[in-house]
Image: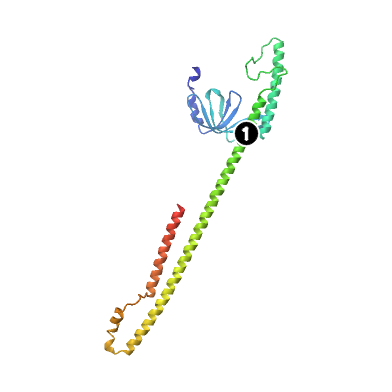
Amino acid sequence: MEALVPFTTSGQLLNCVDKKMLVALRDGRKIIGVLRSYDQFANLVLNDAVERIHAEDEYADIPRGLYLIRGENVVLMGEVDLDFEDVVPLKSAPIEDVLNKTAVLDENRAVADSVRDAVLRQRGFCTERVDGDVDVHNYGHEPSTSAFTRQQQVQHAEQLKRDAELEAEAEAALQMEQQRAYIMQQQQHQQQQQQQASELKAIEEQQMLMAQQQQMAFTQQQQHLAQQHAQQPQHAQSVQPVQSMQTPQTPILTPEQHQRFIHHQQQQFYQQQQQQHNQFRY
């Protein structure tokens, strides 16, 4: 029941939210990440977390992503000073090298501890470890399981690296596909614009031809009327316009009417083109 007692000082973590923190765990691991949330039992949620491993003057980070830490496993926690984060007496190294060097150091430490414990027992002293504790080593011991654990960590780090590469390749392929689709859409849109422009040009040429024909017909009609007025007596000149109005003829556009007709056709074409552009855009 003692484990269920709330962490009474968890309210002090409020100032640490959204800050980069270093958390030391009971098993010796060091986790660095941005504190996003916590509860009354000091259970922590770290974002963009990495597990930092040290070996002599080298270090490596194993990405952990979103990381949940049980409050009872926290030994120490402190804020990382961003101004001095890069000013450390350690140099970054490949994770495989650091893990291999750490495994060697653990083995050497285990051998030294085993020799020390054997000497203490021979002289009647009790040792720091008892049967059942972690890393119990005797003189002439078998290799510890730490090397196997390090190998698993190396494999896990390699798997994370491969997953990140595959994700980057998939994202790049998706971007290329989207860019290719966008280019095809642009080409289709340009083709439609060129086709519409050619159709409009053909319409304008046809209209200009019709206007020229109408202008020629109008000029010929005016000349013909002028000749008739010159040949007929004066009393018949007032009747001739009425007869010409009653005869069915093809409507003739004046130059001003023709310009207004062309302007109206162009406005309709531009409105249709703008509507098609808006549909393609959205």
233 relative to 40, above or below: below
Residue 35 vs residue 100, the one in the foreground: 100
User: In the orientation shown, which residue stands out farthest toward the top?
Assistant: 124
Name the residue type under label 1.
Ala
> Where is mark 1, residue-wise?
157
The image quadrant that residue 203 belongs to is bottom left
Residue 108 vs residue 266, the one in the foreground: 266
Q: Residue at x 70, y 24 (%)?
A: 107
Q: Is residue 193 visible?
A: yes
In this rendering, position of residue 116 left or right of residue 200: right
3 relative to 192, above or below: above
Could you say where residue 186 lies in the image, as x and y percent from the top left? Answer: 51, 56
Coloring applied to the structure: rainbow
User: In the orientation shown, which residue stands out farthest toward the front?
Assistant: 248
Could you say where residue 100 lies in the image, as x and y percent from the top left? Answer: 69, 30
Could you say where residue 254 lies in the image, as x and y percent from the top left? Answer: 37, 75
Could you say where residue 22 lies in the image, as x and y percent from the top left? Answer: 57, 29
Residue 53 vs residue 22, the one in the foreground: 53
Q: Residue at x 47, y 64 (%)?
A: 197
The image quadrant that residue 106 belongs to is top right
